Amino acid sequence: MTFDPPHEIPDEPPPDALAELDVAAQALAGLAQRSARLTLGMDEQSRTIKIELHEGAGAATALTPTQLFTLLGPS
């Protein structure tokens, strides 16, 4: 039995995907400079993604996926 994938997988990532990863990496470096960090997890009961931004000694701020993409996207 053979499996034909529904889409062709390129040998290299598309240039626009690499550019978006570079922007996100710069945003993460900026968070590290502020001593902030992101945590990602899964709430097993609700089966939802849990995203938190930790800054300083205060409580973590919950983020939606849209807020995470805004945070990691271009300024």
Image (spheres, rainbow, N blue to C red):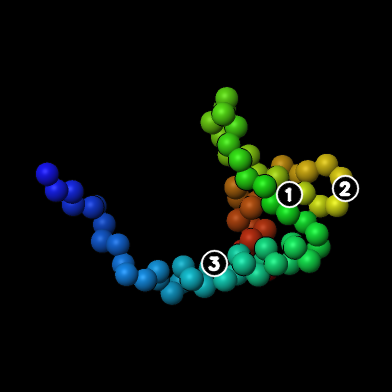
Q: Earlier in the sequence, mark 1 or mark 3?
A: 3
Instruction: Give amino acid for label 2.
Output: Ala
| Disc 2: CA contacts within 10 A as few (<14), some (14-19) or many (>=20) | few
Asked if residue 4 lies left or right of residue 67, the reply is left
Quarter of the image containing the N terminus? top left
Q: Which residue is mark 1?
A: 53
Q: Secondary structure at mark 2?
A: loop
Quarter of the image containing the C terminus? bottom right
Can see residue 58?
yes
Can see residue 64?
no
Q: Nearer the viewer, mark 2 or mark 1?
A: 2
Disc number placed over residue 57 in the picture, else none: 2
Instruction: Give amino acid for label 1.
Output: Leu
Q: Earlier in the sequence, mark 2 or mark 3?
A: 3
Residue at 40 percent across and 69 percent down: it is: 13
Asked if residue 21 lies left or right of residue 16, the reply is right
When asked about the image quadrant of residue 40, the answer is top right
In 3D space, how far apart are the residues under numbered discs 2 and 1 (Cα atoms)?
Answer: 12 Å
Q: Which residue is mark 3?
A: 21
Q: Position of residue 27 (x, y in %)?
A: 67, 65
Instruction: Give amino acid for label 3.
Output: Leu
Q: Are marks 1 and 3 in contact (CB under 8 Å)?
A: no
Q: Position of residue 37 (x, y in %)?
A: 73, 54
